[in-house]
Image (tube, rainbow, N blue to C red):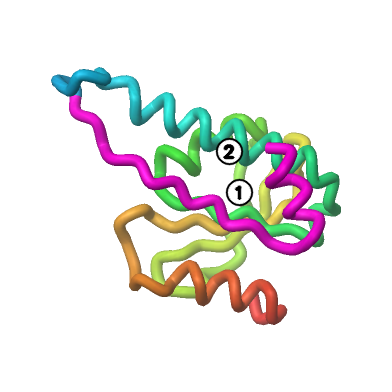
Amino acid sequence: AHRIGTALIKGSTILRPFAERCSADSVWGANIPQRITEMIADVAVKALAESQLNKDELALILTGGDTAMCVLHMLDYKGIELCREPIEGIVQGKLQGGPCDGLTVITKAGGFGKENALLKVVEGLQGGQI
């Protein structure tokens, strides 16, 4: 989390985990996907805190419903004020409540959209168009 927080201060970071889904009858058991999701959420929240960036300098891009909900839960938010849909199926809003109140958050369903959709969102954020 420290390295990611430091990287956020210097620019942007993309955290892209690759985890295969584990079935309930696998050797690892049914709770492995949940544990992976919780670890990703924990790192994301700690990186946000570590960066100490102003919420106006940062946008949180979350993919996959379980991961997004886990991160948001750890941020102790009350809701999201929806602002727009920068790309079909990708929603932008502002967190309401909690320590990151007002932070821009963008959510995307894990298995939805074109291959370059997230890249377009990041480019739009960096260029000030989103």
Hey, what amino acid is under mark 2? Leu
For disc 1, the marked residue is: 80
Where is residue 115, by image quadrant? Answer: bottom left
Numbered circles on residues, count: 2
Q: Nearer the viewer, mark 2 or mark 1?
A: 2
Q: Secondary structure at mark 1?
A: strand
Image quadrant holding the N terminus, namely top right
Q: Position of residue 61 (x, y in %)?
A: 57, 56
Residue sitting at x 46%, y 74%: 87
Comparing 14 with 89, the one in front is 14
Disc 2 crowd, CA 10 A, few/some/many (<14, 14-19, 20+): many
Residue sitting at x 72%, y 52%: 103
Residue 11: say if magenta: yes
Q: Is residue 57 left or right of residue 109?
A: right
Residue 112 position (above or below residue 66): below
Disc 1 crowd, CA 10 A, few/some/many (<14, 14-19, 20+): some
Q: CA distance from mark 2 to mark 1?
A: 10 Å
Q: Which residues are magenta?
A: 1-23
Q: Position of residue 5 (x, y in %)?
A: 74, 45
Residue furthest left as drawn:
25
Q: Position of residue 34 (x, y in %)?
A: 39, 27
Q: Are marks 2 and 1 in contact (CB under 8 Å)?
A: yes
Image quadrant holding the C terminus, namely bottom right
Residue furthest front as drawn:
3
The disc label shown at residue 72, or none: 2
- The kind of secondary structure the magenta stretch mainly shows is loop
Residue sitting at x 46%, y 40%: 67
Residue 107: say if magenta: no
Q: Is residue 63 left or right of residue 7?
A: left
Hey, what amino acid is under mark 1? Ile
Residue sitting at x 74%, y 58%: 58
Instruction: State which tag comes first along the sequence, 2 or 1.
Output: 2
